Amino acid sequence: MQVENHKEEVPFAHYEERFRELDAAEAAARTGAKWDGNKFYVNLLGREYAISHPEYALQPLDGGALPPLPVQTFLLRYLLESKNVAWAGQWKTFREMPWGEMYIKPYTGRVLTRAAFTFGTRLAAFKAAAEKMGATPISHGDAGYQFQLIGGYQMQILVWEGDEEFPPNAQILYSDNFAEGFAAEDRVVAGDILISTIKSNM
């Protein structure tokens, strides 16, 4: 197959190859994902997926369309590298977690600025989309919601509406177990996926 989109297809192909060699029972024990001997079952932002192993195939159990390749790559990396870490009940910004300071500039542009200008200019649509997804409202920002990302990992997104004096603003908080359970690059992608999923529901 000729690779057309190197940015998405090359990483996906790499992790798909690694997935074939995955010890499925070990991955299920490490992540807490359900494994029936043929497929893993994972829930990402309210959508349930069956993931066949060792030959990768992804099936959305709601009958909807397949998610884009970056989401599929995230799910592969979750099974390959993440682990089930208990949440101690605290919230952290991206910057407060390991490697956060190093990645903060690209993270700010790719996630925080995008969230601010996607949702802070359309607050009513943001609220409607978050509620449609079953998120829990929180009393921070002009609008704020808590989402279950995957497994025991939670995220909050807080949005402030722009006005004549100030541009819109946004903050994303991660349950503290992200610090140990996900690499910095996966925390960036988690923010990206959360924004894209909310946007698709607007």
Image (spheres, rainbow, N blue to C red):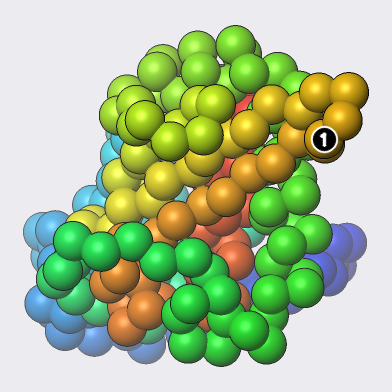
User: Can residue 24 be seen?
Assistant: no
The answer to whether residue 22 is left or right of residue 88 is right
Q: Residue at x 75, y 45 (%)?
A: 114
Q: Position of residue 176 (x, y in %)?
A: 30, 69
Residue 128 vs residue 123, the one in the foreground: 123
The answer to whether residue 60 is left or right of residue 65 is left
Residue 147 vs residue 35, the one in the foreground: 147
Q: Residue at x 63, y 44 (%)?
A: 170
User: Can residue 30 be seen?
Assistant: yes
Q: Position of residue 188 (x, y in %)?
A: 59, 66
Query: Which image quarter: residue 65?
Result: top right
Query: Which image quarter: residue 123?
Result: top right
Q: Which of the image's four quarters has the C terminus? A: top right
Q: Is residue 18 above or below residue 90?
A: below
Q: Which of the image's four quarters has the N terminus? A: bottom right
Q: Which residue is mark 1?
A: 166
Q: Is residue 33 above or below residue 98?
A: above
Q: Residue at x 88, y 61 (%)?
A: 4
The answer to whether residue 21 is left or right of residue 195 is left
Q: Identify the amino acid type marked 1.
A: Phe
Q: Position of residue 28 (x, y in %)?
A: 16, 72
